[in-house]
């Protein structure tokens, strides 16, 4: 066991503050990684503030962060895929039981015994797992990803959650050329969704509550931008979408978007607002529309996504910040004021 510097929260109402956490010494299958960059996901905020307390209560202290890119510093004797000096990445998952049907299908994110990167039981040290707002992490090599060499590391970090969470449902629902695809909410997830839908050849429409994001949306790959609070603009797109990805973090009216789906169209929720969202049955009944959800992606698909990003030169648009600005970053995200992901430069942790 060794200690590493970190930033964490002591309770649902505390700010993030400097702390020290323990990490296990690498076992034979483990990779030890010095963390270089960690993206800030809205899930970090929901968890730090215990906003999902009913289904997924937060255990304190909590060290968030699951968009991790770093450099390998040590490997266990049985590790074959990594050696010291390699760039390596870790997303939302650090373990699973490896034996259930979901694991066999490469869908570790649905394993009943999956271990999330933070706020899951830590079978090695007891307590809970701690995430990427820290100096280093130790992870079984099966859950460590490779980053294509051409990608900027600060911009690659958010691919590990925002990237896979938007890529996976688009592949599942067949987003491709000639499909009309909507993306609701131009935040961290939303801006990655726009890049992927565009790269997959779809006609992409962004729905935003922030009119000033229009030019950015077009630059990111959107073909059209709709201000979702404008009912006339919304009506023009009635019954026309094959697929809509909803990446909104707060309460909003999903029926307005369901009505924009064509026959057999699908709206997938990836955003996870704290409160239930009311659904109008009639909006689904007519035109046999469907509503579904999607959770990150499995390890093999995460590597596929990273390789896709390497081939298409896709990274997240990031604002790099020192860890000392993380509380300010949370407040800005809550005001939709981020272009389009904060990426923490963990070198800043050394001065703590
Ligand atoms: N399913 C999964 O596996 C998974 C993975 C990661 C994250 N998530 C969840 O996905 C959600 C988004 O995460 P994120 O990191 O992308 O968050 P984010 O960067 O904060 O973006 C959220 C966006 O939602 C829109 N929005 C915010 N408040 C709104 C409101 N009241 N009404 C309508 N739109 C609003 C804003 O876009 P505009 O300014 O364009 O309107 C905002 O930029 C969070 O709930 C997060 O927990 C789920
Ligand atoms: Zn996330
Ligand atoms: Zn399993």
Image: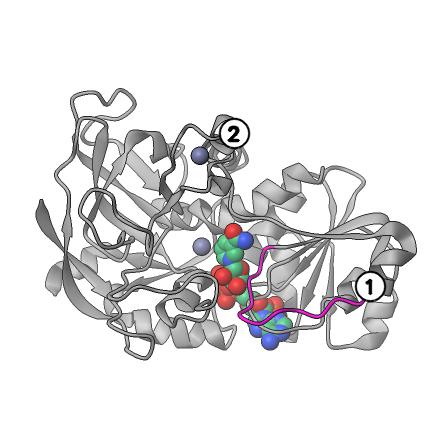
Q: Is residue 339 left or right of residue 170?
A: left
Q: Is residue 340 visible?
A: no
Q: Is residue 272 magenta?
A: yes
Q: Which mark is residue 281?
A: 1
**Residue at label 2?**
101
Residue nearest the observer in this picture, 165 or 277: 277
- When asked about the image quadrant of residue 133, the answer is bottom left
Q: Which residues are magenta?
A: 270-280
> Can you tell me which quadrant of the image ligand 3 is in?
top left
Q: Residue reaching furthest left? A: 2
Residue nearest the observer in this picture, 52 or 183: 52
266, above or below 300, in the image = below
Residue 213: x and y in percent read 61, 69
Residue 252: x and y in percent read 66, 73
Q: Is residue 117 magenta?
A: no
The quadrant of the rendering that contains the C terminus is bottom left
Q: Could you tell which of marks 2 and 1 lies nearer the N-terminus?
A: 2
């Amino acid at each position: 066991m060794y200690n590493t510097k970190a930033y964490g929260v002591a309770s649902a109402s505390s700010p993030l503050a400097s702390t020290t956490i323990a990490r296990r010494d690498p076992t034979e299958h483990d990779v030890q990684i010095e963390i270089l960059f960690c993206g800030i996901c809205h899930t970090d905020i929901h968890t730090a503030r215990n906003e999902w307390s009913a289904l997924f209560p937060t255990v304190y202290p909590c060290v968030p962060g699951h968009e991790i890119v770093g450099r390998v510093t040590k490997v266990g004797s049985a590790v074959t895929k990594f050696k010291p000096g390699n760039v390596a990445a870790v997303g939302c998952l650090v373990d699973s039981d490896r034996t259930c049907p979901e694991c066999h299908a490469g869908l570790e994110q649905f394993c009943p015994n999956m271990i999330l990167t933070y706020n899951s039981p830590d079978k090695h040290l007891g307590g809970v797992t701690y995430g990427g707002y820290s100096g280093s992490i130790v992870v079984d090599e099966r859950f460590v990803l490779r980053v294509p060499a051409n990608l900027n590391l600060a911009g690659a970090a958010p691919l590990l959650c925002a990237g896979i969470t938007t890529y996976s449902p688009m592949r599942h629902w067949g987003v491709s050329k000639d499909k009309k695809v909507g993306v609701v909410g131009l935040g961290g997830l939303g801006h990655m969704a726009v890049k992927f839908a565009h790269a997959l050849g779809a006609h992409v429409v962004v729905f935003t509550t922030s009119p000033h994001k229009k030019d950015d949306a077009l630059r990111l790959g959107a073909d059209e931008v709709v201000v979702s609070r404008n009912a006339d603009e919304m009506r023009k797109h009635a019954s026309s979408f094959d697929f809509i990805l909803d990446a909104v973090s707060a309460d909003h009216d999903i029926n307005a978007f369901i009505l924009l789906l064509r026959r057999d169209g699908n709206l997938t929720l990836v955003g996870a607002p704290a409160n239930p969202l009311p659904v109008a049955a009639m909006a689904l009944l007519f035109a046999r529309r469907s509503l579904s959800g999607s959770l990150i992606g499995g390890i093999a698909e995460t590597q596929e996504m990273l390789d896709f990003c390497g081939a298409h030169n896709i990274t997240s648009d990031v604002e790099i910040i020192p860890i000392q600005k993380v509380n300010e970053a949370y407040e800005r995200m809550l005001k939709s004021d981020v272009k389009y992901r904060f990426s923490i430069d963990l070198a800043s942790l050394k001065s703590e």
